[in-house]
């Protein structure tokens, strides 16, 4: 077998391979002999069909079958011989065709390779860790949100105001059209006034209505509305008010605490405070980790394999588009042009690939590995976060393939924790609400 390796760029390579005709003929003969043992043909007993007849009938198909074998086996040997490790899937040239009996078979593949680099020193990196403690005000705010989630309503006589629940029947029409639009038929539809859950103007138009009222609610769909047929168009909803209900003020007593699995309000407040402490600690760790990655990215500049960046970009972009689709939103919701959004996500993809390569090299250099105990502990942690489904979680991760899904994140965490243990971290107390912005709150 003849092999040549060509550098076509800083990290791109072209590998050309020629497989001798003798090897092609050997593979073809082996396969034809297998077929001859079972092939059935009129006038011949099974296994007694002459080889030249088998070859004439099945030769083309056999050559097609052995193409994949020729390529995979010779490519693996060539990679080993030239001591190259492709980054991503090698791309086959288009003109190779199928092998032919009695002829050498030549083909080439192009691929990227991983860069060779030595990670910058991480010992002694200076970082600032923002920390904060939950306030009494935050505890009460969270209790208020808990009460909101379990809010009950009672029938109300009189006009609806903000905070009331108004239940309607209605049908929506684009202004000037006689037929209602798809999705505009509202049946026994509850609306909490002031919740902002509907398009602008809808809830405000229902303030002051009473049970039994009929009202045309005029609105205009936002220009970025997910339905292109309605985006930016004026509409009217012909509504009938079925009932008005007002929210009952929550009583923060022990009975309320039992709704959340606690015996007393004191216990619930303590639980809420502990949850806030966990959230703040997670926000602190997340911010510290990002600061660390900023330093690592800045200190480790080298060329990246284009194919790996492309694959990462595609994964990030597709995930973002799927998320928008599930929420019924278009790309306009990103607040920027598609071109600018793609440029931003490509930068993110490059960052992820760079950090992944550096962390992998640090883990290799310092012999950091994910042990079986790490995997078992993570599975138990996942099970604990899904009460009532512990057995299903453990059964799901009993499959080694599924365990591999958590190995990558575990490895990154172990390497990151090791780097942080070598860093010089100074704590900095910040405003609690400032730190909670880490979660968009």
Image (cartoon, rainbow, N blue to C red):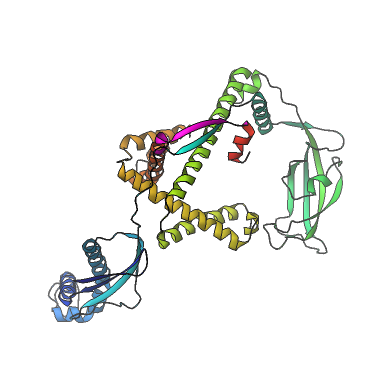
In the picture provided, is 50 more to the left or to the right than 84? left
| Residue 181 coordinates in the image, percent (x, y) | 74, 60
Kindly indicate the quadrant of the structure image that contains residue 39: bottom left
Q: Is residue 421 magenta?
A: yes
Picture layout, residue 392 above or below residue 4: above
The vertical placement of 47 against 417, above or below, is: below
Residue 348's spot in the image, x, y percent? 51, 53
Q: Which residues are magenta?
A: 419-431
| Residue at position x 38%, y 51% in the image | 357
Question: Which residue is at the front of the view, 85 or 256?
Answer: 85
Quadrant in the picture for residue 310: bottom left
Residue 356 appears in the rendering: yes
x then y, percent, for residue 202: 79, 48
- Quarter that holds the C terminus: top right
Vertical placement of residue 126 versus 144, above or below:
below
Count of marks overlaid on the render: 0
330 vs 40: above or below: above
Q: Nearer the viewer, residue 150 or 1?
A: 1
- Is residue 165 part of the magenta span, yes or no? no
> Residue 391 appears at what percent x and percent y?
41, 34
- Regarding residue 261, the answer to whether it shows in the image is no
Image-quadrant location for residue 231: bottom right
Residue at (63% x, 31% y) in the render: 431
The N terminus - image quarter = bottom left
Q: Nearer the viewer, residue 328 or 336?
A: 336
């Amino acid at each position: 077998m003849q092999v040549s390796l060509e550098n076509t760029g800083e990290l791109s390579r072209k590998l050309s391979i020629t497989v001798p005709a003798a090897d092609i003929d050997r593979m073809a003969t082996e396969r034809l002999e297998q077929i001859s043992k079972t092939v059935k043909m009129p006038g011949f007993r099974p296994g007694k069909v002459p080889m030249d007849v088998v070859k004439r009938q099945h030769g083309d198909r056999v050559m097609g079958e052995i193409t994949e074998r020729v390529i995979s086996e010779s490519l693996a040997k060539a990679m080993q011989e030239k001591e190259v490790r492709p980054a991503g899937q090698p791309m086959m040239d288009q003109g190779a065709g199928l092998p032919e009996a009695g002829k050498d078979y030549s083909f080439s593949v192009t691929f990227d390779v991983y860069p060779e680099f030595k990670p910058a020193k991480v010992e002694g990196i200076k970082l600032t860790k923002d920390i904060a403690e939950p306030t009494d005000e935050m505890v009460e705010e969270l209790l208020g949100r808990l009460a909101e989630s379990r809010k009950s309503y009672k029938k109300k006589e009189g006009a609806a105001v903000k905070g009331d629940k108004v239940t309607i029947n209605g049908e929506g029409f684009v202004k000037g059209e006689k037929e209602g639009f798809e999705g505009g038929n509202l049946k026994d539809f509850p609306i909490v006034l002031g919740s902002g859950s509907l398009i602008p103007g809808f809830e405000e138009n229902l303030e002051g209505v009473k049970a039994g009222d009929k009202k045309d609610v005029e609105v205009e769909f936002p220009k970025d509305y997910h339905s292109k047929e309605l985006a930016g168009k004026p509409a009217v909803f012909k509504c009938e008010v079925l009932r008005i209900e007002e929210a009952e003020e929550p009583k923060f007593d022990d009975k309320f605490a039992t709704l959340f699995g606690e015996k007393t309000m004191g216990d619930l407040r303590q639980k809420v405070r502990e949850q806030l402490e966990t959230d703040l600690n997670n926000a602190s760790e997340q911010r510290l980790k990002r600061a660390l990655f900023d330093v690592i990215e800045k200190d480790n500049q080298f060329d990246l394999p284009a194919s790996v960046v492309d694959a990462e970009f595609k994964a990030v972009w597709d995930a973002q588009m799927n998320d928008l689709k599930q929420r019924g939103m278009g790309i306009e919701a990103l607040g920027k042009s598609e071109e600018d959004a793609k440029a931003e996500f490509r930068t993110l993809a490059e960052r992820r690939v760079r950090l992944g390569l550096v962390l992998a090299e640090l883990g290799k250099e310092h012999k950091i590995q994910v042990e079986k105990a790490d995997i078992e502990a993570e599975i138990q942690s996942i099970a604990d976060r899904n009460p009532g489904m512990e057995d299903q979680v453990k059964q799901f991760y009993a499959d080694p393939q599924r365990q591999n899904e958590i190995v990558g994140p575990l490895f990154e965490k172990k390497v990151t924790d090791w780097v942080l243990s070598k860093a010089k971290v100074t704590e900095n107390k910040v405003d609690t609400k400032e730190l909670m912005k880490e979660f968009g709150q």
